[in-house]
Amino acid sequence: MIRSLAATLFALAVMCSLAVPAQANSIAISGTFMGTSTFTATADPAVFMASFSGSGVDSVSGAFTTSNTGTAIFSSSTAFTESGTFADIFAGGTLFGTFTGNGTLTGSTSTSTANVVITGGTGIFAGDTGQSTNTGTCTGTGLTCSFTGTYTGSITTPEPSSLALMLAGIGFLPLIRNRLARGRQAT
């Protein structure tokens, strides 16, 4: 009984040690994007609902369409903070996440910097996470403007072999246990 338990624990420890060295793959990304931002007034004169739709080109994954929704809160007539959610749609899948940032307004032009957190994806981006810093300029009149921007950051892709090794090892535990049990019966 003790030998069976010790052998099972040893096999589990070996499997775990094989899975630990596998690391996620981090890839540097950068790109450009452009589109139209539309702002909608709320009951609070300092708060606007914001939406953006456009397209861009990523240095690794190619062309994409993008959209985001959020809020812009003005702390003065020339300074604002922004936050919301986004989705970038590529040929092979979608990346999505959140953003927070700040900006300034001078006449009909605003400049902003946003910290973007990639929280997940679909298709070839399933399980991906990451971050980027987006900067851009929006020029327009009224509550609509044309936005152009750039971004740099990284995306992390999970390493599937870690999970596969661990699941394979767990699958072998009953076989090891049965073999040890048969060995005890023979003696």
Image (cartoon, rainbow, N blue to C red):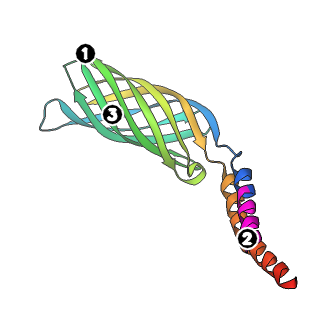
Q: Residues within 10 Å of mark 3 (few under 14, many from 20)?
A: many
Amino acid bearing label 2:
Ile
- Check if residue 8 falls in the magenta segment: yes
- Gap in Å between the C-alphas at discs 2 and 1? 79 Å
In the picture, which quadrant includes the C terminus? bottom right
Q: Horizontal placement of 50 versus 172: left or right?
A: left
Q: CA distance from mark 1 to mark 3?
A: 16 Å
Q: Which mark is residue 37?
A: 3
| Residue depth check, mark 2 versus mark 1: number of the one nearer the observer | 2
Q: Which residue is mark 1?
A: 107
Q: In the image, is 72 to the left or to the right of 66?
A: left
Q: Earlier in the sequence, mark 1 or mark 3?
A: 3
Res 183 → quadrant: bottom right
Instruction: Examine the rendered structure and indicate whether residue 125 appears above or below residue 133.
Output: below
Vertical arrangement, residue 78 with respect to residue 51, above or below: above
Residue 2, numbered label:
2
Q: Position of residue 178 (x, y in %)?
A: 77, 78
Residue at mark 3 to residue at mark 2: CA–CA distance = 68 Å
Q: Residue at x 73, y 70 (%)?
A: 2
If you read the primary sequence from the N terminus, does the residue marked by circle 3 or circle 2 appear first?
2
At label 3, which amino acid type do we have? Ser
* Tag 2 secondary structure: helix
Magenta region's main secondary structure? helix
Q: Quick one: label 2 or label 1, which is nearer the N terminus? A: 2
Q: Which residues are magenta?
A: 1-13
Q: Amino acid at mark 1?
A: Gly
**Considering the numbered disc 1 on the image, is that residue within a helix, a strand or a loop?**
loop
| Total numbered circles | 3
